């Protein structure tokens, strides 16, 4: 893997607009802009934020046996994954899952989208395109399938927050038609002309885009895939279109605090090169069959079924905004002071606070328990990996040997997230 | 992020290599963090203040600042006793971002005023920043 630091096509824009930059997954990326991470985090909850996510990698898996290859390598059962009835993945729908190795260690997490019977888009994390292209290539023996690494060949912008559709509709043709029948984890269009996609989505200047109702903030919004040469223009057009909604460019720090509050794992930090066993994300795996195994055989399944669970990954939330940095010297203690595990993520969700026993968000309706005049100071939150099973409500301490922070094991963190809201409520 | 030329670095303060400032006001010295520090840290979400009456040695940890990016220790720029803390920071830690020189953190009664002379003046601090 090259250690050279790369730039996305928006790098100049980030610098010109005062972003605080840092290296992330081989790319020099904005952490925050002059507004600051708190303002960016709150903008996504209240209205909308714009994220440069072109550092993320993608692949296409194409050919008569593309589905078979994914069924073998991807943790979700594509024949049983949609909705409550667990129906097969179909054209225009996407599913979240994992690529595991034989030992059930996580190579990366991914969203797989079915473009057609013989074409799938596989979106993975920054820097992972080459590794996963090679990984899939090692398992496609004798299959009629072609895997193409799209790293740096695809521009990607995420618009996230409740006003995302109102902003986006100004820039696309036939917004009424496009936004009709557009549930969570579905997509429309393709980022190049052709490709045999039934439904196309184009910007007002005829540029084709792939519009996906996904993202990684827990809030309503879209991921927009576009040809690289259109990326900067689209970014600027979105910011202009979003002015009346106070759309804010957002950096990776806000993305991290938003996803932590939404209980979403960061690959290679919360899930990674260790067995994927007891986690808050069992939905990333195939369904369990009545026999006790999974509904399909896939890479890592045997290890998942046979391994004895020794580690438990759990979400937590603190009682104030204080964090414990993840470092070699920080760890998790039980209330008696015994070391029981490590901290995977510790961030501050600045949109939430505690009201008596409950966590309330600035987005929580007054009728659902948000007090009048509620102002959130923020709560630390994230994930720990411990050597014993803990239950919701248990209290543990995060420490670096000096400072101690009391946190509570939670099932969920930020309430009243908008990601799954019906499209008709968001226009 | 601010360019060095955009930083506000008042002439009448002394600075430390840990990006704090110290200002003499009569018998006592007020301590805070520099514009550079607040810009690098980003939004400050929590300030752990020392207690009035605590004594610290020069270089001793007298509190912590939590930003979205990191938790940073505050180091006492000189030996002394804490005579006051800026309690407004408990509810509004963002004051340190908004006005790092108005938003002082603690006030010390120095044990040895000559230690102030060991701190950097504006020009020396600017040189240090250019090297960062």
Image (tube, rainbow, N blue to C red):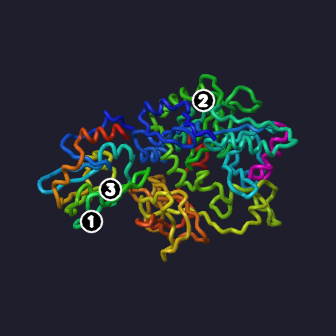
In this orientation, which residue lies closer to the viewer: A171 or A408? A408
Residue B121 is drawn in which quadrant?
top left
Q: Is residue A237 visible?
A: yes
In this rendering, the answer to whether A274 lies above or below B94 is: below
Quadrant in the picture for the N terminus of chain A: top right
| Residue at figure coordinates x 77%, y 30% from the top left | A196
The single residue placed furthest to the top in the displayed view is: A205
Q: What is the distance, in whole Å, between disc 1 and disc 2 at their CAs?
A: 58 Å
Q: Is residue A78 magenta?
A: yes
Which element type, helix, strand or loop, lies under badge 1? loop
Front of the two marks 1 and 2: 1
> Which chain contains the residue that carries disc 1?
B
Q: Residue A257 location in percent, x, y?
A: 50, 51
The answer to whether the residues at label 1 and label 2 have Cβ atoms under 8 Å apart is: no
Query: Which label sits in the foreground, 1 or 3?
Result: 3
Chain on which label 3 sits: B
Disc with the residue nearer the chain's start (1 vs 3): 1
Give the residue number, with chain letter if any, for mark 1: B51
Say if A107 sits above or below A328 in the image.
above
Structural distance between the alpha carbons of marks 3 and 2: 51 Å
Disc assigned to residue A172? 2
Mark number displayed over residue B74: 3
What residue range appears in magenta? A63-80
């Amino acid at each position: 893997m090259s250690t050279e630091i790369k730039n996305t096509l928006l790098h100049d824009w980030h610098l010109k607009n005062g972003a605080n930059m840092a290296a992330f997954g081989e790319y020099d990326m904005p952490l925050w802009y002059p507004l600051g991470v708190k303002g960016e985090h709150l903008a996504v909850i209240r209205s909308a934020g714009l994220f440069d996510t072109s550092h993320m990698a993608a692949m296409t898996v194409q050919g008569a046996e593309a589905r078979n290859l994914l069924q073998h390598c991807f943790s979700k059962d594509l024949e049983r994954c949609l909705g409550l009835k667990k129906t097969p993945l179909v054209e225009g729908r996407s599913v979240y899952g994992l690529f595991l190795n034989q030992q059930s260690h996580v190579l990366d997490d991914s969203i797989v989208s079915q473009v057609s019977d013989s074409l799938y888009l596989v979106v993975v994390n920054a820097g992972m395109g080459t590794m996963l292209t090679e990984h899939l290539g090692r398992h496609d023996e004798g299959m009629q399938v072609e895997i193409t690494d799209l790293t740096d060949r695809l521009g990607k912008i995420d618009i996230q927050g409740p006003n995302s559709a109102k902003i986006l509709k100004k820039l696309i043709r036939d917004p009424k038609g496009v936004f009709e029948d557009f549930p969570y984890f579905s997509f429309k269009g393709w980022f190049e002309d052709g490709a045999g996609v039934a439904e196309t989505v184009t910007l007002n200047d005829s540029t084709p885009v792939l519009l996906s109702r996904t993202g990684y903030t827990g809030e309503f919004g879209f991921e927009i895939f576009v040809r690289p040469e259109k990326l900067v223009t689209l970014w600027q057009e979105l910011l202009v279109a979003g002015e009346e909604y106070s759309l804010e460019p957002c950096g990776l720090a806000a993305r991290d605090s938003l996803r932590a509050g939404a209980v979403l794992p960061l690959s290679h930090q919360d899930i990674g090169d260790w067995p994927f066993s007891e986690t808050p994300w069992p939905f990333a795996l195939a369904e369990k069959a009545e026999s006790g195994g999974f509904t399909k055989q896939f890479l890592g399944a045997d290890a998942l079924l046979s391994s004895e669970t020794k580690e438990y990954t759990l979400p937590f939330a603190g009682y104030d905004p204080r964090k414990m940095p993840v470092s070699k010297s920080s760890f998790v203690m039980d209330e008696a002071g015994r070391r029981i595990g490590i901290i995977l993520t510790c961030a501050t969700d600045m949109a939430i606070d505690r009201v008596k026993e409950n966590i309330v968000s600035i987005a929580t309706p007054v009728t659902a328990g948000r007090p009048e005049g509620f102002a959130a100071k923020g709560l630390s939150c994230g994930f720990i990996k411990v050597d014993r099973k803990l239950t919701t409500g248990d209290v543990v301490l995060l420490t670096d040997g000096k400072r101690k922070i009391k946190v509570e094991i939670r099932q969920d963190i930020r309430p009243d997230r908008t990601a799954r809201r019906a499209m008709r409520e968001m226009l | 992020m601010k360019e060095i030329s955009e930083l506000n670095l008042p002439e009448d303060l002394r600075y430390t290599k840990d990006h704090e400032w110290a200002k003499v006001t009569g018998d006592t010295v007020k301590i805070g963090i520099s514009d550079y520090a607040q810009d690098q840290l980003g939004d400050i979400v929590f300030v752990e203040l020392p207690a009035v009456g605590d004594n610290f040695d020069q270089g001793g940890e007298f509190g912590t600042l939590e930003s979205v990016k990191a938790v940073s220790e505050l180091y006492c720029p000189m030996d002394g006793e804490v005579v006051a803390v800026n309690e407004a920071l408990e509810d509004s830690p963002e004051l340190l971002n908004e006005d790092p020189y108005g938003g002082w953190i603690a006030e010390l009664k120095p044990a040895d005023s000559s230690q102030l002379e060991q701190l950097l003046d504006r020009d020396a601090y600017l040189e240090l920043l250019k090297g960062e």
